[in-house]
Image (cartoon, rainbow, N blue to C red):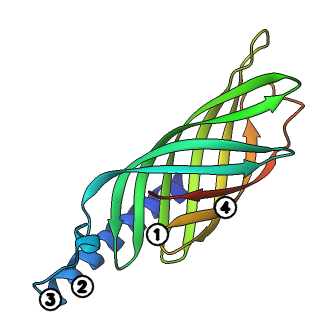
Amino acid sequence: MKRMSIVLALLIISLQETSYAKADSVKVDSVESDSAKERDGEIRIYYCPGFNYQGRLSPEFNLMYGQRYRLWGDVGIRLGSEFILLNRDILLGPKLGMELVISALGIRGSLITYLQSGMKTDVVFLAEYGIALGGMGNFMYGYSIPITQGNKNLTRKRFTLSINL
């Protein structure tokens, strides 16, 4: 696991340096449209609403603080929450994670704490991978790994569709 983290960090650093070198060598028209005002590598906050399906369809709302690079993708930290309806009760799932998109492939890791009234909290690590939809959103498959006692009403496998605004 430690080796994989080191390899991933080195990959991110090398891709950032490569994208800066390529961006410097590419000539850009001096006239930009209003929709192209976002600068390459500019840090900003993205609103990322979506839906996930893990035995039942539920909405999720996220904010991503990150950078988008035209040449290879985006990287950022995500903060959000899921809202799951269980037996007339709402299961709230605040989460913190990181997302990395390289070209059309994306990976995401999140720590989710599921809170339900009158019950113990459940903490899971969610690993997801999938397809980036041209910077407009993501379609991901994920697997939840319970850290504390898992909720029997939720499946470990899930699909997530989110858009980046």
Label 2 to label 1: alpha-carbon separation:
19 Å
Q: Quadrant of residue 69?
A: bottom left
Label annotation for residue 45: none
Query: Which amino acid does the dot numbered 2 rest on?
Result: Lys
Q: Identity of the amino acid at label 1?
A: Gly
Report the residue at 69% width, 21% height from top: 115
- Badge 3 amino acid: Asp
Q: Quadrant of residue 165?
A: bottom left
User: Quick one: 89 or 10, which is closer to the camera?
Assistant: 89
Task: Give the mark nearest the N terminus, 2 or 4.
Answer: 2
Residue 26 sits above or below residue 48 on the image: below
Distance in Å between CA atoms under marks 1 and 3: 22 Å
Q: Which is nearer the N-term, disc 3 or disc 4?
A: 3
Tell which residue pokes out farthest to the left in this image.
Answer: 30
Q: Where residue 156 sits in the image (x, y, percent)?
A: 82, 45
Identify residue for label 2.
Answer: 22
Q: Which residue is mark 4?
A: 140
Q: Nearer the viewer, residue 138 or 127?
A: 138
To which residue does mark 3 refer?
29
Q: What percent of the width, then of the height, locates residue 164?
A: 48, 58
Residue farthest front in this picture: 34
